[in-house]
Image: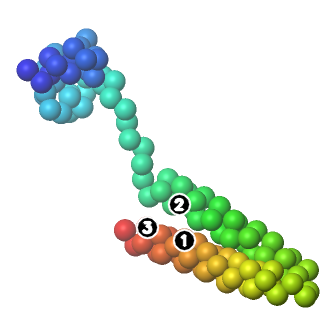
Amino acid sequence: MIFSLLSKFGALDPKNCEDADAFNPKDTPNCLSNLPEVAANSSNLKLGLGIVFGVAAGVALLSLVIAAINFATASTDFEKVARSKKAIIYSLIGLVVALSGEAIVLTLLDNI
């Protein structure tokens, strides 16, 4: 029953699946499946999360540089100095979070 439904909706290629198990057609060596193969592994996850954390760290670093420039050029504008100090603190917190997140992910994925 399930095998015929899968064949009807194009999930299995019926040419080579005459004796395939309905729940596990890949156990039959000649059975072709149109279902997508998942190629996820820890190296792909490391790469993806490394990119995400790297972009986050880059944004935090860029924000830190801009805030530092604003702080240096603020001179007598005390409101701008206070805003720049807050931006520097938040940028440093963001940088620490991004770098520690990267370290945690790499540690966990290396130990799995």
Kind of residue indicated by mark 1: Glu
Is residue 19 left or right of 62 when viewed as pictured?
Answer: left
Say which element carries label 3. helix
Real-space Cα separation, disc 1 to disc 2, in angstroms: 7 Å
Query: In the image, residue 13 lies at what x, y percent?
Result: 28, 17
Q: Quadrant of residue 39?
A: top left
Identified at 82% across, 87% down, the residue is: 78
Real-space Cα separation, disc 3 to disc 1, in angstroms: 11 Å
Residue 110, placed above or below residue 1: below
Kind of residue indicated by mark 2: Leu
Q: Quadrant of residue 30?
A: top left
Q: Mark 1 or mark 2: name the one nearer the start of the chain.
A: 2
Given residues 79 and 42, the one toward you in this image is 79
Residue 104, placed above or below residue 43: below
Residue denoted by label 3: 109
Q: Tell us which disc is closer to us: 2 or 3.
A: 2
Query: In the image, residue 7 lies at what x, y percent?
Result: 22, 17
Say which element carries label 1. helix
Residue denoted by label 2: 49
Query: In the image, residue 2 lies at what x, y percent?
Result: 12, 24
Q: Mark 3 or mark 1: name the one nearer the start of the chain.
A: 1
Residue denoted by label 1: 102
Quadrant location of the C terminus in the rendered image: bottom left
Kind of residue indicated by mark 3: Leu
- Label 1 environment density (alpha carbons within 10 Å; few <14, some 14–19, many ≥20): many
Check residue 26 in the rendering and tell me which mark sits there, or answer none: none
Quadrant location of the N terminus in the rendered image: top left
Query: In the image, residue 111 lies at what x, y percent?
Result: 40, 72
Res 68 seen here: no
- Label 3 environment density (alpha carbons within 10 Å; few <14, some 14–19, many ≥20): few
